[in-house]
Amino acid sequence: MSFRWKQAEAPVRAADGGDPVSQRFSDQLIAVLPRLRRFARGLTGSATEADDLVQAACERALAREHQFQEGTRFDSWMFRIVQTLWIDHLRAREVRKEDADVAEERLGSDAPVRTIEARLALGEVRRAVQLLPTDQRTTLMLVTVEGLSYKEAAEVAGVPVGTIMSRLARARIALQQHLETGGGSRRSLKNAEAQ
Amino acid sequence: MQKRSDETLVAYLDGELDSAERQHVEAWLAADTAARDRLAGLAQSATLVRSAYAEIVNEPIPERLIAAARGETGGSPAAVPHEAEILVLKRPHRPIISMPAGRWGIGVAAAAGLFGLMLGGAGSYLATGGLNSTNSAAEQRLAAAAAHSTWLDNAAGYYKLVVSAGDSMLIDVPAGGDTGEALQKISQNLPQQVRLPDLKPWGLNFRGARLVVVEGRPAAQLVYITDNKAIGPLTLVIGASKLPDIQPTFDRRQDVNMLYWRHHGRAYALVGQTDIGYLWGIANDVAWQLDAI
């Protein structure tokens, strides 16, 4: 999968005769990369696709550095770019996510049994998240995983706070129901906590 | 007033209700066993979701993403990332269920206090703190802990950038000449004037200062270098804080040691790879010189 876009939108490097990319802007971008990868992983369900998405988001952010407003949250701005690219991608490809990507998760063969069980269960949680509709999944990742407030999540998603509330409630209830019927996850909580 | 719904319970867990709404929900929960079970289930599933994605932020970052963040990709096939740089800010001593920055911890903590849920790190905190849903001081401590953790992650990340850049490190305000003028420049972007601690007695020379962004707000990163490779570079990050004062406290991110403290609206983090005894001595000196203790 590629998230490339037309050349004109790519960042212009100093070596190409353009303005150098702001060091401070790049530093901020690097600092937020771990969370962008996590957010993207939640959206795509795949490590490879997530990194492709984050790379595309970095390139778009650098191309549009001038649009970032100092004094606003940089992470929220980047989350919005990631989300926008992902929606564009879904619209273009009209593909539905399948859970085959879970095979990418690596389980250490020499890990204790308890760890393996916990990771399997956490993989089950990630699969459950992937079954949610895109808007609910995005909201869940922004609020429950990334810790944004409802207001901040609403700004990222471009929807009213009330919509965030209802999406989040639906997502959490659907997830809870799935985990209750899926089995194993509740047992795994103790294992996960024990890590 | 919120109606009695799942939306209300979720918002309660996320700390999104105001005081009156919270009291209303707590009265409801006190009288309704089914609602309490519902809340406990919602809290537990949220904890599982956080756990499922917690480790991703500790994974090494692929160099192609570092290159992308530096503008070295972007449709230019010739753009080859230079030296590989892996930024790993792992917290090995923390439980897998970590608490990201944000407000969600407040409501979860309140719910846990009410119903005895064990929620990873928060759970153990509650167990020792005797938290209940009306204990606003404890809620504040939890929220502060979450925010503080991210602040320190960033301080360690900026230190890693200094180390990886080496001599090519970009300095907003270089040392030499009038340091007062230099600090004046940095302070223009900060709520208060930054002063420069003299660390020459420790063998550390001021290399310059950088303006960084921590938690969405500008902060000063003062960079000190030394010829002693065992000590390596050291940075002092000074930012604004609305949290209560705390004494110097040790923390660690992978191979980076940190001492942090807050004093009169400012947060300080002394960051380096030298041993903790050395950091303690320097931190005390810094605090004394800056009247920051």
Image (cartoon, coloured by chain):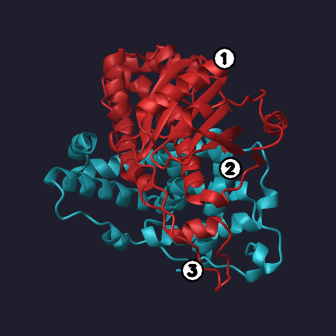
Chain colours: A cyan, B red
Q: Which chain carries label 2?
A: A
Q: Determine which residue is flagged by label 3.
A: A2
Q: Which of marks 2 and 3 is in front?
A: 2
Labels 2 and 3 within one chain: yes
Where's the N terminus of chain B, which quadrant? Answer: top right
Whether residue B143 is visible:
no
Q: Position of residue B156 (x, y in %)?
A: 53, 44
Q: Determine which residue is flagged by label 2.
A: A74
Residue drawn at (64%, 71%), measured in percent from left and top? A88
From the viewer's perspective, is B60 left or right of B172? left
Q: Dot 2: what SS?
A: helix
- Crowd band around label 1 with a 10 angstrom C-alpha radius: few (<14), some (14–19), many (20+): few
Give B15 or B161, whichever is nearer the viewer: B161
| Residue sitting farthest toward the left | A113
Q: Determine which residue is flagged by label 1.
A: B291
Spatial separation of the CA atoms under disc 1 and disc 3: 54 Å
